Each structure stands twice: as structure tokens, then as C-alpha cells.
Image (cartoon, rainbow, N blue to C red):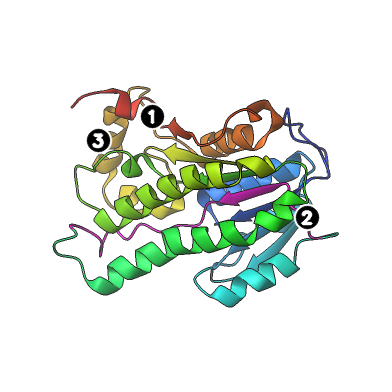
Amino acid sequence: MSTAAIPGIQPGQTALVTGAGGGIGEATVRLLARAGVRVVAVDVKEPVPDLLGAGDIAFLQEDLTDPEAIRRILAAIPGDGALDYVVNAAGVAWFERDGSALDIGEDVWESVMSINFGAMRRLSVATVEPLRRGTGRSMVHVASIAGLRSMDSPLDAYQVSKAAVISLSRALCLDLAADRIRSNTVCPGAVLSPMIEYLYDEDPSRRTRMEDKTPLGRLGTPADMADAIAFLLSARASFITGIDLVVDGGWIAQIR
């Protein structure tokens, strides 16, 4: 398979990517694999049919809210178990059940926090030692502009979970600086991903409204986010840590 180089990322390095069964996680797996990176890809869903043929990819179907899953994932890291990159892209947005914190059920709140934040925290902590033994030494966590700004239609469990991801990433940046392990977030805006695509299919005018809210006039794509993630992982970003890279077509630059 032909490779497509990513400046600052070396073929033969090893990455762990969660949320790899679709959307931003899948796009990131494909991009890194094309660059010759060995990828351990994780999702609770099965892989899309052609993903395993896209490069040196080992796919694990695991529920990240299960603490035992972390042990199995670490055991699947090839070679001596060292990691160069960790990408926490797993997450959910339950538009039908989430809403105002004043109204949503405790089960919804706890589940969203467990998936979007709790699993990210456990995996980040568990991969510190493998990252210490690697050379890339970079974590990128997929957050959201919802973690930086309030949404016009409340999705409070999602919003708070992503704010927690952002806050923990900044803490990890300081906690791990002595090890030269970097921690950053990517904060997507409106992205045409499987998590939300069905809403646009049900209501095409919703997509139009989201495009109209975005100064660049289009929705983001998983590939847009993967490119931003790869930059932050790479040696080109070797002096960047503790930042939240907004990739939203200009959305939060405006007052509405």
C-alpha cells in the first residue's frame, strides 16, 4: 500500500486511536495508517468494512467504560508496548435524551460523562507509561466548541463532558511536561459525521442553518479534524501543549 507522508510523523511509529469505528476517529486512523503509522484502533462498534485494509491497523471492539477494557487495549500494543501517539476521539451526543441539566435524567448525565470524560481520563492515565517509552509523546483529545461556549439548544451533559475533557487536557499538559509528553485538544464545530448526519437526513433545513452559521459556509468533515489532530501529534507542534485548537470554520469568532 502506498504511503502519504505527514510532516513530523515518522513511519513505523505507533498510535492508539479511540472512536475508530466512524467519523473523526476513523478518519484519523486512515490518515495515520497512510503515513505508515501502526495503529491500534478501538471502538465499541465493529469497524467499517474496508478499514482493516487501509494500513497496519489492529482493531479492538471494546467498551471504554469497562475498566478491564483498558488492560486488554494496552496488551494489544505491538512490539515492546511503547506508544508514540494517543488520540481520544470516542464520544457520544444523545440529542434525543440530553438537554437542560434541569430536566435530563441522572442516568443520561452519568452515561454521557462516563463515555465522553471518564473513559478519556482512564485511558490517558493508563497510556502515560507507554508514551514515556515512545518518541512521539503526544496526546490529542477530541473535545468540542460546546466545551468552550454554551449551545443555543441545550445539550448540557455533552457540553459539560467536553469542558471537562478540555480542563483535564490542560492539567495533563502540566502534569506530564517533565516527561515531554504533550496534551492538546481539538475542538470541532459543526461536522458532518455519523453522530449527527442522521439529523440532517431527517431535517435538511437543519444542515442549511448550520452552514449559514459557519462563516466559511460549509460543514466541517472528519478529514478536516483528522488533519488538525495529525498536526498536533506531529513534531511540527513540538512546542505546543495545553492548547485547544478550534476547528470550526470561524463559528465562535462571531457574536450572534
Cα separation between marks 2 and 1: 39 Å
Cα separation between marks 1 and 3: 10 Å
Front residue of 26/169: it is: 169
**Left or right, residue 80 beside residue 51:** right
- Residue 65 location, x and y as percent? 49, 71
Cα separation between marks 2 and 3: 45 Å
- Residue 124 location, x and y as percent? 57, 56
Label 1: element kind: loop
**Left or right, residue 160 beside residue 7:** left
What residue did someone put label 2 on?
Answer: 82
Does label 1 or label 3 sit earlier along the sequence? 3
Please state which amino acid type lies under the numbered disc 1: Arg
Indicate the quadrant containing the C terminus: top left, top right, bottom left or bottom right.
Answer: top left
What mark, if any, has residue 209 been given in the picture? Answer: 3
- Residue 54 location, x and y as percent? 73, 50
- Characterize the local packing of mark 3: few (<14), some (14-19) or many (20 or more) Cα atoms within 10 angstroms: few
- Characterize the local packing of mark 1: few (<14), some (14-19) or many (20 or more) Cα atoms within 10 angstroms: some
Q: Do we see residue 150 in this rendering?
A: yes
Does label 2 or label 3 sit earlier along the sequence? 2
Label 3: element kind: helix
What mark, if any, has residue 218 been given in the picture? Answer: 1
**Left or right, residue 239 beside residue 57:** left
